[in-house]
Image (cartoon, grey):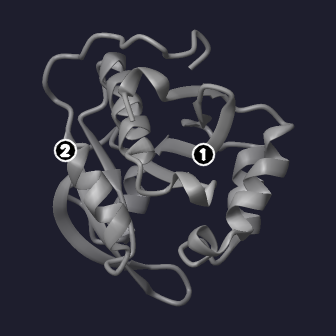
Amino acid sequence: MELRTVSLQEFRTSHRVSLARWLSSPPVAKWYPDPEDILGWASQPPAGGAHAVIAVPSLELGYVRWQRVPRDTLDSLGLSEIPHNAVDIDILIGEERYLGKGIGTEALLRLVDRLRREGDVPMLGLSPEPTNFVAIRSYEKAGFRFHSEYSAGDDRRVYRLMTLDCSGAPSEKRQGDSQKD
């Protein structure tokens, strides 16, 4: 998949239907046990949060959301070394036939570029479950590296924190990004 064919498009209310379908598909549902939480977030992102639909020409096929993580949240998870203004990312490819084609990695690279251009984002992070090997490999291809593991939630699920240092110079805008993203 060539990068110029992957874009991040404005998330609209009508996308909730597609997001619900993607969250119920077996390859996605395995990693998202609480789809109502994701759908609620998509309906009303918190302060400092944003989201987009991942698209290729003529097809919307995934979802990405991101938000700045409050200092008290990081500290409560034992992640006090993560800098202020760090951004947490969550991404999914919902159309099963497009899994394993590099689209998630390319969408993530687009988002990394966008967030680096903001200039005040010191670090990006993703938190897959340690057994989500496909996601972990995709994140590694996008430049993210293992940082640590931590537990969260009522069930104390374990997550593998993968980070990318963004303290360097912002990257240039790539062709194909939507003006609204």
Q: Position of residue 78 (x, y in %)?
A: 28, 71
**Type of the residue with mark 2:** Gly
Tell me the quarter of the picture where residue 54 sits.
Answer: top right
If you read the primary sequence from the N terminus, does the residue marked by circle 2 or circle 1 appear first? 1
Task: Check the image and report above or below for 181 versus 130.
Answer: above
Give the camera-side residue of 103 and 13: 103
Question: Residue at point 54% right, 36% down?
Answer: 48
Task: Check the image and report above or below for 86 versus 90.
Answer: above
Q: Which residue is mark 1?
A: 63
Q: Which residue is mark 2?
A: 143
Q: Position of residue 139 (x, y in %)?
A: 29, 53
Q: Position of residue 86 (x, y in %)?
A: 33, 42
Give the camera-side residue of 97 and 14: 97
Q: Is residue 69 visible?
A: no
Question: Residue at point 37% right, 27% down?
Answer: 3
Direction left: furthest residue: 168
Marks 2/1: CA distance? 20 Å
Q: Position of residue 105 (x, y in %)?
A: 36, 44
**Type of the residue with mark 1:** Tyr
Left or right: 137 as drawn, with respect to 81 = right
Task: Check the image and report above or below for 173 versus 21.
Answer: above
Left or right: 163 as drawn, with respect to 92 = left
Q: Quadrant of the N terminus?
A: top left
Tell me the quarter of the picture where residue 22 sits.
Answer: bottom right
Q: Is residue 180 visible?
A: yes
Question: Local crowd at mark 2 within 10 Å, few (<14), some, or many (≥20)?
Answer: some
Task: Check the image and report above or below for 116 versus 159.
Answer: above
Give the camera-side residue of 56 and 132: 56
